[in-house]
Image (cartoon, grey):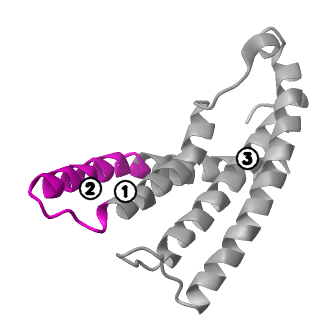
Amino acid sequence: MIRAASLFVRLVDKMNYGVGRVAMYLLFVLMGILMWSTISKAAGAPSLWTLEMAQFVMVAYFVLGGPYAMQMGAHVRMDLFYAQQNPVRQAWWDAITVLALIFYLGVMLWGAIDSTAYALHYNERSPTAWRPYLWPIKVILCVGFALMLLQAMAALIRDVATIRGKTI
């Protein structure tokens, strides 16, 4: 059992590490879009697509980078009492909070899948002048929520192992 759990944690960590490292480069894509927006406005021919595309890229950057940030411990934590506790007590607190996170991510993933199915079925488009299809960004949201859910499960497994005196 511990071997299967360890394998799951390693696979999820490896996958999210790779996705997170690739997602970091979306920041450069975002900068390029915003630079094009500035140049086109200064030239007197503003582009219709730049604002919405920048929003889509930022959502992808945030959602795909979230599991990587969780894996690296880069998320915000209230350390007022947490840092003073021993690793087992910290693992207990982490396990409790990650259960709430897993519930939240499950609800978010369920809603994202439903919204993506709607967007695909009805060819949903944005109501702006550019009118892009919305299914690509909704698929990215589903993937991001699924990766975050897997990373939260890996964190829970790691916490339970710590509570039991094992290390993963």
Read off the residue under disc 1: 54
- At 48% from the left edge and 48% from the top edge, which residue is drawn? 20
Q: Which quarter of the figure has residue 93?
A: top right
Q: Position of residue 109 (x, y in %)?
A: 71, 64
- Marks 3 and 1, Cα distance to the nearest angstrom? 28 Å
Query: What type is the residue that disc 1 sits on?
Result: Ala
Q: Secondary structure at mark 1?
A: helix
Residue 57 image-quadrant placement: bottom left
Circle 2: element type: helix
Q: Viewed as shown, does residue 129 lie left or right of 46?
A: right
Mark 1 neighbour class, 10 Å CA radius: few under 14, some 14 to 19, many 20 or more = some
Residue at numbered disc 2: 33
Amino acid residing under circle 3: Ala
Task: Report the side of 63 relative to 58 (left or right).
Answer: right
Question: Which callout, 1 or 2, points at the residue further toward the start of the chain?
Answer: 2
The residue sitting at 30% across, 61% down in the picture is 50
Contact check, label 1 and label 2, Cβ < 8 Å: yes
**Disc 3 target residue:** 152
Which element type, helix, strand or loop, lies under badge 3?
Answer: helix
Rendered residue at 39%/63% (across/down): 52
Task: Look at the image and say whether residue 110 sits in the magenta stretch.
Answer: no
Who is closer to the viewer here, 109 or 34?
Answer: 34
Task: Give the farthest residue toward the left.
Answer: 43
The magenta segment:
22-50
**In front of the other: 9 or 84:** 84
Q: Magenta stretch: dominant SS?
A: helix
Q: Tell me if residue 62 comes above or below residue 129 in the rendering.
A: above
Percent coordinates x, y for residue 61 in the rendering: 46, 51
